[in-house]
Amino acid sequence: ADFGSTVRIRGDTIFDSNVTVVGTFTALGDYRIGDHAAHPPNMMSPTFSSTVGLALLAFVAVATPASAVKNFVELGTAEDFAILSKSGVSTVPQSEIRGDVGVSPIAQGALTGFSLTVDSSGTFATSDQVDGELYAADFKSPTPEKLTRAVSDMETAYTDAASRSPADFVNHESGRLGGKTLAPGLYKFTTAVGFDDDCTLMGSATDTWIFQIAEGMSINSDKKIILAGGALAKNVVWAVKGVSSFGARSHFEGIVLGATSATFVTDSSITGRVLVQTAVTLQKTTVTEPTSADEPVSVTETVSGATETISGATEPNSATGPISAEASAEVSAGVPIAEVPAVDAAAEVPRRAGSRRHGL
């Protein structure tokens, strides 16, 4: 669509899923992109590309639903754990877990493959595979009571995440999400969800993703979930009713709230938490608690007279693609503009380690 210099559209607007806008575009009414739900004004995420003699403002079809803003799922005391299970956690060494591990109402015998060393206090155990502590329901008080509360909070969080409405996207791409870029929002699937290729979650450090999956979820070997634009693993929740399975050497991001089990095949990894109501199986798996970014930063890029201001924290290794944080730019048609590179703010954004409370 060629809008010339500056255009404001006051009425509701429907765009095709692949739109290129020449000039400056401001939507004052609701808009819809492809099969996405209608969204309020000023929520589009622009990226820039170059052309001879023209300034192109290309809107990527990753519109951000208003319901996605600060739509967090509270984990309660379940957030104290990298892995929490009701039926047991098994590992084929050498796994690496950065965070605490808990099982309840089952006893420490359900922590298999860890070569446990029980602390002299009797309230927790340690393992050379865990950078943290392991807890079971048969350890000394106050561990049993704390675990009971954590499991209850886990179940409450699952029910909350799985029952939210209305959904922004229903059966998006029929659950085949490999190769896709997903905007923040609430996704509802009545089918299984699978990743046969890498999948990117594009958004800012304050955006959230909630996936309601009525069947199982799986990711193929050597595939990964990528967080871009400052998106944080702690803000991504996968509420999975069926079995969750993670292929060899795959990498996943987010909080897995499972009504059943989670199985990780050799050399798979996840940045997030695995909170499930049956069993967790690990095979030389790396599980890392999510971290939190500090306050968002503001970066300004000026290219050939056009100024782009970007707000939102950018995590390390996430600035290799377009920035999808809130952005604004004004360019005049007919003014050549070079491609604006991705802003590498990784070195500028301090990171805090994820909080963990020990000594239950």
Image (cartoon, helix red, strand yellow):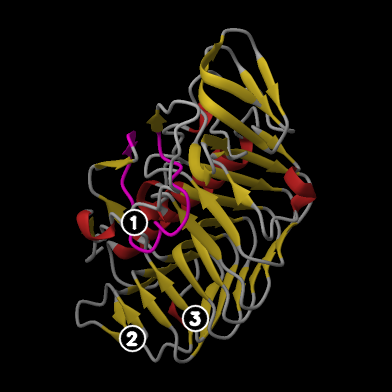
Circles 2 and 1, Cβ within 8 Å, touching? The answer is no
Residue placed furthest toward the top: 10
Looking at the rendered image, the quarter that the N terminus falls into is: top right
Who comes first in sequence, dot 2 or dot 1? 2
In three-dimensional space, the C-alpha distance between marks 2 and 3, rounded to whole angstroms, equals: 15 Å
Q: Which residues are magenta?
A: 305-326
Give the secondary structure at mark 2: loop
Who comes first in sequence, dot 2 or dot 3? 2
Q: Is residue 243 visible?
A: no
Q: Is residue 312 magenta?
A: yes
Reading the image, the residue beneath label 2 is 127
Residue type marked 2: Ser
Looking at the rendered image, the quarter that the C terminus falls into is: bottom left
Q: Which residue occupies the foreground of this view, 101 or 42?
A: 42
Give the secondary structure at mark 3: loop
Q: Which residue occupies the foreground of this view, 161 or 296?
A: 296
Residue at the image point whose x is 41% and y is 43% from the top? 204
Q: Which residue occupies the foreground of this view, 300 or 125?
A: 300
Residue type marked 3: Thr
**Picture layout, residue 6 above or below residue 276:** above
Total marks shown come to 3
x, y percentage for residue 337?
A: 43, 41
Rendered image quadrant of residue 272: bottom left
Reading the image, the residue beneath label 1 is 315
Reading the image, the residue beneath label 3 is 285
